[in-house]
Amino acid sequence: MEEILRRYARLIIKTQLKLERGDQLSINTEGSYMDFARLLAKIACEATLQTVNIVETNHGKVVQVIQMDPIEPEIFRPEVKGFVMCHIFSLDETPFQHDGKPKALANEVALLGSFGLLSEPVFLDRRIAVPWANIPLPGPNWASQLLDAEVTNLEMWNLFAMIFRLEDDNASSFWESQANLLHFRKQKLNKLGPVELNLTGSGWSLKTTKAPNTLWAGGMNTVSSGRKFIPALPMQNVFASLDCTLSNGTIASSRSFLLFGQTVEDATFTIEGGKVTSFSATKGKEALEAFFAIDEGARQVAEISLADNDTLESHYLEKGVHVHFNRAMTSNIAFGGFTLASLTDQDSDEAIDDSHLSRSLVRLEIPVGSNSLSVTALNGEGDMTTLMEEGVFID
C-alpha cells in the first residue's frame, strides 16, 4: 500500500498538477487523510522548492493550517511564481445506501451535496484561475459497493491501483498519453462547429443539439495563464453542453446507478423540447421522482459525455456508485445544471441564456454507453460524421 500511495502522490504532482519550481501548493484535507497530505506536501516541496500549506478542515470548517517547508534555506528558494490547489477526499464520504425517503432527502441542500448531486455554481466572475485537482482516496464501502462483496484492505487498494494505473511506475506516461488522445478528440469535434447529434442505443434514440457558442471539453484543462492541469482522474471522456430546448426522443440507462442512496435500474426517459416528460424504472423510481421535483431545471437535458465502452473503467466500474467516476465509466446524458468548462466567452447571465444552457441546483448523469451505442453529428452544411460505433470512438 505504501508504494501505491507514493506512486499516487508522484502522479498528482507530476501529471495532474504539473508542479514547477516556484509554485505554491495548497492542500485542502480532512484530518483523517493527513498522512497522505503530508506525503503529498513532501514530494511537492521537492518539486517546487516552496512552502506547501496543508489546510485541515472538519466538515468544511478550517481547523488549522500546517506549513511544510523545503529543506533548502529560504535564501536559495525561487520566487513564488503561481498558486496551485488540490482537495483530498475519501470515496466513502458519500452515503452509498440510505434508508431515508428520497423526497425528504431532496429538501436538504447539504444532503444533496453529500450525494454528489449539486451542480457547479455559475459564478462567471469568480472562476478558478489556477491549476486545481480533486484527489480521491479509496474506502471499503466504495469498493464493497462496486464488487458486491465485503473486501479486505488489500483488495480495496488493488482495485483503486488498477483503476488509476498505479500497479507500476508507468501511471504518468499512461495518463499523459490519454490526455493527448482526448485533446485530439476535442480538436476534431470542435472543428465540426455547431452540430446536431443523433444517438442510438438498444431500443432508444435521441436527437439533440450542441449549445451555441460552446466547446467540447474534457481531459486536460488550461487556465488563463496557459498552465495546463488535469482536474480529475481517471479520465476517458469528452463532453459538450446541449441546447436545453432542442433534445427529443428517448434514452435508457445501460447500467444501474445510485440516487439518494437507492439503486435505480432499467430507467427510461422520454424527452420532448429538451425536457423529461415521462420516465420509468424497474427499481428506484421514487428516487427519480424526488430528483425531478427539486426544480424546473432538473428535468432539462444539459450535457452529453462520450467515453469508450471498451476501457478498463467501463469493465470494472460496472455500475454508477460514485459520481467521481461517472464520466470515465461510460457515455452518459446529464440532466440539470451544465458544466462551466464548455463555455467560451460568456460573461453574463444573459450570455448564458443566449446559449440555451440548462440551469439547475442539481445534476444527474445517466449512463447510456454500451456496445449498442452509435453517435453521429450533422453540421450546418448537411455533412454527417460518425463519432461512435458499437460504443467506441471512430478515431
Image (cartoon, rainbow, N blue to C red):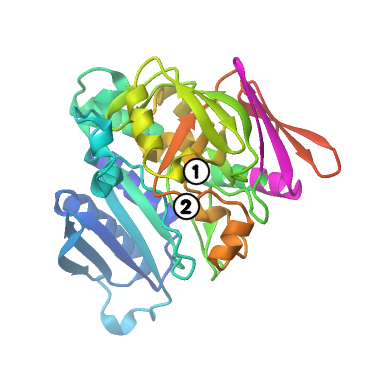
User: Is residue 285 visible from the viewing direction of this image?
Assistant: yes
Q: Residue at x 23, y 41 (%)?
A: 93
The residue lying at 31 percent from left, 55 percent from top is 87
**Which percent across, then down, holds residue 150?**
20, 20
Which quarter of the picture shows residue 387?
Answer: top right
**Is residue 315 rendered to the left or right of residue 184?**
left
Residues under numbered marks 1 and 2 in contact, where contact means CB atoms less than 8 Å apart:
yes
Q: Is residue 165 visible?
A: no
| 84 w.r.t. 392: above or below | below
User: Tag 2: residue type?
Assistant: Ile
Q: Report which quarter residue 71 is drawn in.
A: bottom left
Q: Which mark is residue 369?
A: none
In percent of the image, x 59 and y 38: which residue is there?
274
> Which callout, 1 or 2, points to the residue nearer the camera?
2
First in residue order: circle 1 vs circle 2: 1
Residue designated by label 2: 230
Is the residue 275 above or below the residue 54 in the image? above
Identify the secondary structure beneath mark 1: helix
The answer to whether residue 193 is above or below residue 334 is below
Q: Is residue 311 left or right of residue 245?
A: left
**Which residue is labeled 1 in the image?**
175
Bounds of the magenta segment = 185-209
Quarter of the image that includes the C terminus: top right
Residue at the image position 59 percent from the left and 15 percent from the top: 202
